[in-house]
Amino acid sequence: MAERTFVLPDLGEGLEEAEIAAWLVTEGDAVALNQPIVEVETAKANVEIPSPFAGRIAKLHATAGTTVPVGSALVTFEVADIIPNATPAATSGATPAVRKLAKELGVDLASVTGTGPGGRVTREDLERAASGPEIGTEDAEVVPLSMIRRAIAANLTKGAAVPSVTTFRTVDCTALEAFRRELEVSPLPVFVRALAEMCRSHPMLNAEWRDDGIRVHARVHVGIAVDTERGLVVPAVRDVGALGIAEVGAEIARLAAAAREGTLASDASAGATISVSNTGSYGSESGTPLLNPPNAVTIALGVIEPRALVVDGLVEARPACTLSCTFDHRVLDGADVGRALTDLVAMLEDPERLRGLPR
């Protein structure tokens, strides 16, 4: 005589467990193939499960009223002969969710050894199998984590935990390029000054989430992402709304130089109310910037380059860029950000509105 263990099968429709409503057999009973042996109750219906073997009931692994996960041992049978592949072994049991994940990861469940109850394959078993064998570290260099890299990691991890959304807008930069060349500045200070102006009409973009309420800032302090040899630093240009474009440009240059030289004041990176990443400076067209906590908004300014735009019904090659705006969805809804970006884009594309900005 051989023993065979039967696990609670997948009952379909994404169900992961069932309650034993009633046993229709007792230990020691002889059963025929396909004889109903147990009635289980799921969130969908009551189901009778037939015996997969002809033999004798050696052990019932759960009592009536017990909730059993799919893939857990249900009944052990004593059978006359071992029937290869007659039923899934306990080690191959897996919940529907795990089976779905296995399909997504392209992992053969039969090749995975389960460590869950009754040998059930768990999500952790599957993820471990999907990651493949560990690669030896004899040819790898471990780069020590600097304090600034640890700070970057902590801040970005905090930002990534915020429920956020990124939306994109294309800007015809014809007017912007002409205006910034007239002022002999880069596009960034013009954009930052225009952003501060936009926040006057859309103050919720210049806000932050607090447990006791949303804090809306009266003044606009713009954090500027600066790439340095030691890592990313985000110093803040204070009270941008009180500055002219030339002053904004000078302050950005001063902060960037200090960041790269490692001479920034200790509080230079504190107090930003909205952040900007000039990803176009290294050729990036667009991206999904992470939030800079506690700011509710980070906007990335992509590279300005010729693109095919439709102007008055005709296709023209014009300088253009993509704005990528990531926002805290606890503070802002998509419509709020959409209206704000529409105003910002309209300002950047309008020569008269650009000339109306303080220089």
Image (cartoon, rainbow, N blue to C red):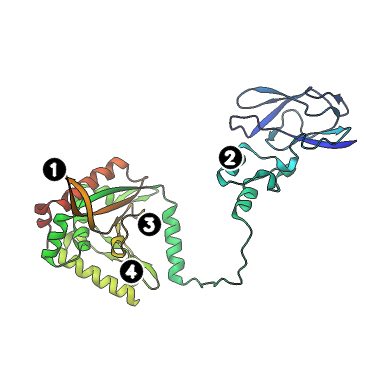
Amino acid type at circle 4 is Asp
Q: Quadrant of residue 337?
A: top left
Dot 3 or dot 1: first in sequence order is 3
Looking at the image, residue 42 lies above or below residue 216: above
Q: Which secondary structure lies at badge 1?
A: loop
- Judge by depth and name the residue closer to the eye, 220 or 143: 143
The residue to which callout 4 is attached is 267
- Judge by depth and name the residue closer to the eye, 340 or 331: 340
Which-is-in-front pick, marks 2 and 1? 1
The residue to which callout 3 is attached is 293
Looking at the rendered image, the quarter that the C terminus falls into is bottom left
Which-is-in-front pick, marks 4 and 3? 3
Looking at the image, residue 51 lies above or below residue 141: above
- Percent of width and height locating residue 244: 14, 63
Amino acid type at circle 2 is Lys
Q: Quadrant of residue 44?
A: top right
